[in-house]
Image: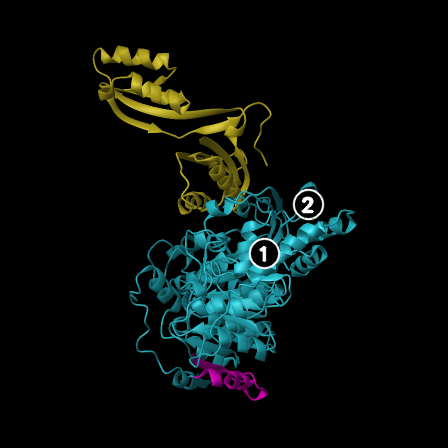
């Protein structure tokens, strides 16, 4: 099953490689991994999307907790949560394609953030599935470039991950 | 007063009460060595290869219960140390390794003797640090000792660039460590402990299985008391030997791939299993699916949550310090009005005695050619079971584990997890320094001993009178055994040709060498080696043993624990 694991860790040099190294050394999957400092600059928050059986996920969480730099670990998928990912798509937009792509962006509540003579860059936020759906909805041949951040997640309501 | 980083290093080690630092100098650590020269709060032991520095520090920790310390230079110093670090990591041994690093300004520029020590060691340390600012040095070393020794212990590396050892700052050694990200759970959950105690009392076919965690957690007294209170059978893992007195009738011997028939059968067929400081690894329970075929309820006590339900699902997990948890459990059991089911227990013991009567460790005692098992048995007799025994890795290691009966913890030092050939001699050095008056025997083989043979020189320099019991069968015995069983006796590269004359070799290093070729001479040789006349001497006993002897019982890789090959079946 797909799980979204959120963790808080000391914002120290090499902290990311400890997590990445753990996943490769123990043969766990990483679908995506995002990391950035939190409002408290001494802490980084990481979101890892992984796939595994319940036993494997249990081990992943225990092994992450065992890392000395890791302060807290939460499996977001265990409760209600919100997941978002940002994607930037550069598409070829010439002639009547421009109108069509603008409409598609609107339908998916995307925004065109760069307009050039022959291209648009569209910014889109949502779950991974929504971003996938957008890419399927537009003509494949117009896609020049895509970049995705990987998922970030947060618990709903009073599910809070904080030190 | 401001001190240099190098002075801070030596002061920190003094503050930690370090007695020995095992190391080897080099460019990046010269400032530290200069400070070592000027101080006398600890002794530096100069090894002949960095691998041995970490092994010796590791053995010092295993034998003494304190944190071992090794000091190596940058680049090859650090890479040579890696095998030692990984060995300590796999067996959860508290060691602090200080490594030199090129100056901070040179890091990343492929400087002379530069390696990314933190990167290279990351997968085989409990934690590691690169100290970039001398102001962080003392606090980092304090943390390193704290992390190494607490929770599930392990090696911690502190990488110190050369310029940091010359920069100056005020020195203040912290009294304590507080880390929001690192707080091992020591007190077990009371509800779980209660449940576990109840489950133990309900057992019809109980079994107590303890590992290295009991030795490391200083809980052998508790294990013994618990087993005695309930009159339940006990088995130890390879790492756990000495956790329960091996000469006691309730002890069924070691379990696992080369465990006894009775221990493996009881493990497989018990209905309630108490696992303490052990991790159900592949060499212990064999195939987990086969193990799971029998219904049993499992209580698992371990300080490391990730060791629980890793290979085997357990019913009552208890995370905590094994000693504390067992103390609490003992209190409950003693206060309980319920007693174990005596009738069921008698039936169970009858079954166990039947298994024991297979006498699975028997071997040909009438052989004129020396049987390796015989040497270990005699060694046990002559040292009155009181020696600290180190071993290397292979057949001799298994015979040592099977035939030397350890009644006390911290007497048996071997590389159980990583299986590092070459540890035996440096382990003996560390053990001898931890216990200067103890008899130290290094049970080894002609292949393993050559992997750190240069340390005979260190033994000479520091007058370490270890006794080397070389079970010389002219083969990498365990490799040969597998080739015989599973590769149609095609002995690919497992024969040690061009062996040195070990007697002359020992003498060349300034030690005593003996060659023993007949069973009849074994006892006399051992007696002489352990006689007062040899009290100050290293004695290298080269026993020419039976080339074809195999270790039994044996559970083939991937097979179930009760699917053993016994000696008489071949």
In this rendering, the answer to whether B191 lies above or below B430 is: above
The quarter of the rendered structure image containing the N terminus of chain A is top left
Q: Which chain is cyan?
A: B
Q: Tell me the SS state at disc 2.
A: helix
**Is residue B12 rendered to the left or right of residue B498?**
right
- Name the tint of chain A in the rendering: yellow
Q: Is residue B510 visible?
A: no
Indicate yes or no whether the magenta region holds residue B523: yes
Q: Characterize the local packing of mark 1: few (<14), some (14-19) or many (20 or more) Cα atoms within 10 angstroms.
A: many
User: Residue visible at 31% across and 60% down?
Assistant: B487
Q: Are marks 2 and 1 in contact (CB under 8 Å)?
A: no
Q: Tell me the SS state at disc 1.
A: helix
Q: Tell me which segment is drawn in magenta.
A: B518-543
Q: Residue B216, position in %: x, y?
A: 59, 59
In this rendering, the answer to whether B434 lies above or below A70 is: below
Q: Earlier in the sequence, mark 2 or mark 1?
A: 2
Q: From mark 2 to mark 1, how far is it between C-alphas?
A: 25 Å
Question: Badge 2 is on which residue?
Answer: B202
């Amino acid at each position: 099953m797909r799980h979204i694991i959120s963790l808080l860790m000391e914002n120290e040099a090499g902290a990311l490689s400890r997590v990445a190294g753990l996943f490769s050394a123990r043969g766990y999957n990483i679908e995506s991994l995002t990391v950035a400092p939190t409002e408290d600059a001494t802490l980084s928050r990481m979101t890892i999307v992984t796939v595994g059986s319940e036993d494997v996920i249990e081990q992943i969480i225990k092994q992450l907790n065992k890392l000395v730099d890791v302060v807290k670990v939460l499996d977001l998928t265990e409760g209600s949560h919100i997941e978002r990912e940002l994607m930037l798509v550069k598409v070829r937009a010439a002639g009547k394609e421009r109108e069509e792509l603008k409409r598609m962006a609107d339908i998916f509540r995307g925004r065109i953030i760069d307009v050039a003579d022959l291209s648009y860059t569209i910014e889109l936020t949502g779950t991974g599935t929504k971003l996938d759906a957008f890419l399927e909805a537009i003509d494949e041949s117009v896609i020049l470039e895509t970049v995705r951040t990987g998922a970030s997640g947060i618990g709903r309501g009073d599910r809070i991950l904080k030190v | 007063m401001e001190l240099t980083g190098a002075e801070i290093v030596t002061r920190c080690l003094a503050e930690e009460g370090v007695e020995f630092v095992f190391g080897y100098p080099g460019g990046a650590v010269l400032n530290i060595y200069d400070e070592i020269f000027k101080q006398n709060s600890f002794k530096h032991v100069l090894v002949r290869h960095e691998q041995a520095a970490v092994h010796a520090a590791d053995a010092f920790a295993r034998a003494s219960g304190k944190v071992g310390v090794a000091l190596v230079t940058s680049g090859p110093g650090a890479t040579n140390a890696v095998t030692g670090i990984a060995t300590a990591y796999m067996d959860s041994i508290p060691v602090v390794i200080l490594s030199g690093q090129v100056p901070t300004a040179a890091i990343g520029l492929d400087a002379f003797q530069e390696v990314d020590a933190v990167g290279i060691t990351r997968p085989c340390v409990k934690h590691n640090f690169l100290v970039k600012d001398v102001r962080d040095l003392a606090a980092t070393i304090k943390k390193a000792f704290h992390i190494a020794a607490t929770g599930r212990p392990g090696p911690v590396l502190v990488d110190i660039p050369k310029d940091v050892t010359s920069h100056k700052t005020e020195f203040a050694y912290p009294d304590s460590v507080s880390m929001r990200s690192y707080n091992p759970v020591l007190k077990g959950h009371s509800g779980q402990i209660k449940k576990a105690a109840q489950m133990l009392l309900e057992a019809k076919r109980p079994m107590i299985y303890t590992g290295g965690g009991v030795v490391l957690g200083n809980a052998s007294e508790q294990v013994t008391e618990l087993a005695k209170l309930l009159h339940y059978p006990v088995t130890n893992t390879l790492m756990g030997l000495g956790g329960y007195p091996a000469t006691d009738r309730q002890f069924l011997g070691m379990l696992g791939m080369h465990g006894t028939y009775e221990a493996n059968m009881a493990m497989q067929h018990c209905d309630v299993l108490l696992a303490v400081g052990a991790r159900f690894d592949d060499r212990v329970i064999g195939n987990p699916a086969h193990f799971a075929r029998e219904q049993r309820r499992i209580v698992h006590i371990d300080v490391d949550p990730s060791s629980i339900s890793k290979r085997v699902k357990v019913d009552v997990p208890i995370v905590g310090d094994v000693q504390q948890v067992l103390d609490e459990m003992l209190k409950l059991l003693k206060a309980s009005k319920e007693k174990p089911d005596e009738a069921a227990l008698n039936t169970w013991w009858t079954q166990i005695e039947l298994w024991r009567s297979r006498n699975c460790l028997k071997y040909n005692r009438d052989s004129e050619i020396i049987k390796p098992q015989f040497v270990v048995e005699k060694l046990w007799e002559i040292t009155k079971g009181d020696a600290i025994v180190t071993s290397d890795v292979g057949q001799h290691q298994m015979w040592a584990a099977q035939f030397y009966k350890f009644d006390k913890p911290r007497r048996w030092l071997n590389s159980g997890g990583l299986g590092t050939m070459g540890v035996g001699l440096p382990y003996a050095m560390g053990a001898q320094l931890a216990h200067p008056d103890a008899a130290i025997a290094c049970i080894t083989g002609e292949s393993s001993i050559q992997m750190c043979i240069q340390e005979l020189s260190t033994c000479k320099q520091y007058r370490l009178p270890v006794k080397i019991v070389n079970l010389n069968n002219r083969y990498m015995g365990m490799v040969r055994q597998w080739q015989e069983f599973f590769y149609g006796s095609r002995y690919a590269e497992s024969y040690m040709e061009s062996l040195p004359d070990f007697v002359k070799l020992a003498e060349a290093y300034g030690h005593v060498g003996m060659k023993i070729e007949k069973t009849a001479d074994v006892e006399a040789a051992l007696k002489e080696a352990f006689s007062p006349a040899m009290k100050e001497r290293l004695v290298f006993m080269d026993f020419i043993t039976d080339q074809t002897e195999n270790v039994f019982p044996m559970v083939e890789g991937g097979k179930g624990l009760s699917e053993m090959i016994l000696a008489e079946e071949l």
